[in-house]
Image: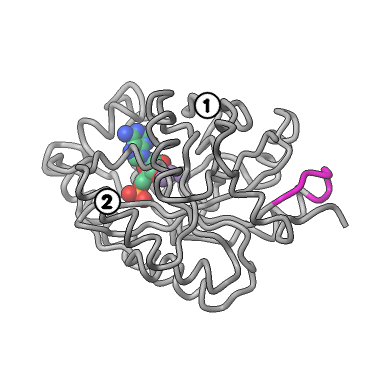
């Protein structure tokens, strides 16, 4: 099954609208799709409608920013009720503070001679509540400060660099509960990205399971093939369902397109086998 259960629209930090993503997923052969905007479900009804019109099976999605052991960890939610009020309120609270953080990021960049970054980043923002580092990165590429977005992150937007502002996101407990209480399944996104020690990773996976989390991304645009091998073992060790998603953001920036990922290893149980009743199909 060509499932792609992780991508972003202009409702968060992607560049395409939900309708354009649905069309691209369909054209690329995706057979089950989820739009997982950061801390936001404002695009879900549009994604459901667009996928339905194309006959593309759809699972609701989001990617929640969490602070765990002082590190930002992302938790994907799949197959929840998009009208659940507690989930919406939790995401709204998680988005709060992004504007202030962005203004502080801009001040940090001004100190190294990059002026007007807040207003510059805003030009790329589709959802005013969701100004993110990605929008700053686009501005710094467009103004020729850097060659591409990964250079911007490396030089300006990660810990220790002038545009980095630490931020406290949702707790792991809350994020997992918001998703599961809304009928969905919580999934640890791209675990290789966190560079955790063995002890830290044990803590993350154990606490995640204790809160009711059930899945982990194994095949993602953020993992190398070695990472996928490693997290296949981790998924089996912890008895977690496996997910697959490109993390597609933009035709110009993302190196893996929607639906263009390796298959999940056959030993794993795909997360969608536990979400059959939650799949939206054409009316
Ligand atoms: P934020 O939620 O504002 O901290 O922004 C996080 C987003 O920045 C992620 O979802 C990615 O889209 C993007 N990002 C993080 N690290 C990198 C990187 N090294 N290169 C390009 N994009 C990145
Ligand atoms: Mn992103
Ligand atoms: Mn992520
Ligand atoms: Mn993502």
Dot placed on the residue nearer the N-terminal end, 1 or 2: 2
Q: Residue at x 37, y 57 (%)?
A: 65
Q: Is mark 1 within 8 Å of ligand 4?
A: no
Residue 213 location, quadrant: bottom left
- The colour scheme used to paint the residues is one colour
**Residue 17 higher or lower than 138, as above or below:** below
Provide the secondary structure element on which disc 2 rests. helix
> Which residue in the structure is indicated by mark 2?
202
**Residue 61 higher or lower than 211, as above or below:** above
Closer-to-camera residue (106/49): 49
Residues shaded magenta: 52-58
Give residue 75's position: percent from left, percent from top. Answer: 43, 55
Residue 232 location, quadrant: top left
| Disc 1 and disc 2 in contact, CB within 8 angstroms | no
- In the rendered image, the quadrant that contains the N terminus is top right
Give the Cα distance between marks 1 and 2: 29 Å
Q: Residue at x 64, y 55 (%)?
A: 274
- In the rendered image, the quadrant that contains the C terminus is bottom right
Q: Is residue 67 magenta?
A: no
Q: Residue at x 76, y 47 (%)?
A: 57
From this viewpoint, is residue 119 visible? no
- Badge 1 local density, few (<14 within 10 Å), some, or many (20+)? some
> Which residue in the structure is indicated by mark 1?
256
Ligand 2 falls in quadrant: top left
Give residue 15's position: percent from left, percent from top. Answer: 54, 39
Give residue 7's position: percent from left, percent from top. Answer: 55, 42
Q: Residue at x 33, y 21 (%)?
A: 147
């Amino acid at each position: 099954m060509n499932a792609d259960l992780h991508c972003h629209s202009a409702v968060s930090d992607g560049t395409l609208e939900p309708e354009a993503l649905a069309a691209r997923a369909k054209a690329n052969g995706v057979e089950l799709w989820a739009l997982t905007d950061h801390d936001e479900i404002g695009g879900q009804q549009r994604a459901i409608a667009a996928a339905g019109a194309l006959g593309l099976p759809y699972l609701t999605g989001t990617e929640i920013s969490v602070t765990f052991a002082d590190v930002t960890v992302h938790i994907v939610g799949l197959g929840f009720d998009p009208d659940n009020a507690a989930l919406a309120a939790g995401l709204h609270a998680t988005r709060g503070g992004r504007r202030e953080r962005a203004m502080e990021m801009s001040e940090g960049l001004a100190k190294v001679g990059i002026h007007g970054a807040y207003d510059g980043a805003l030009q790329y923002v589709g959802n005013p509540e969701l100004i993110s580092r990605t929008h700053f990165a686009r501005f710094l590429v467009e103004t020729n400060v850097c060659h591409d977005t990964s250079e911007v992150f490396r030089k300006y937007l990660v810990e220790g660099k002038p545009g980095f502002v630490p931020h406290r996101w949702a707790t792991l407990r809350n994020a997992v509960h918001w998703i599961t209480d809304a009928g969905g399944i919580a999934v640890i996104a791209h675990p290789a990205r966190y560079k955790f020690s063995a002890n830290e990773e044990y803590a993350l996976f154990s606490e995640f399971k204790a809160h009711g989390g059930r899945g982990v991304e194994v095949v993602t645009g953020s993992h190398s093939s070695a990472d996928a091998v490693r997290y296949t073992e981790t998924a089996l060790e912890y008895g977690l369902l496996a997910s697959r998603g490109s993390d597609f953001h933009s035709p110009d920036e993302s190196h893996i397109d929607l639906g263009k990922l390796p298959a999940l290893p056959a030993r794993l149980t795909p997360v969608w086998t536990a979400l059959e009743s939650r799949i939206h199909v054409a009316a």
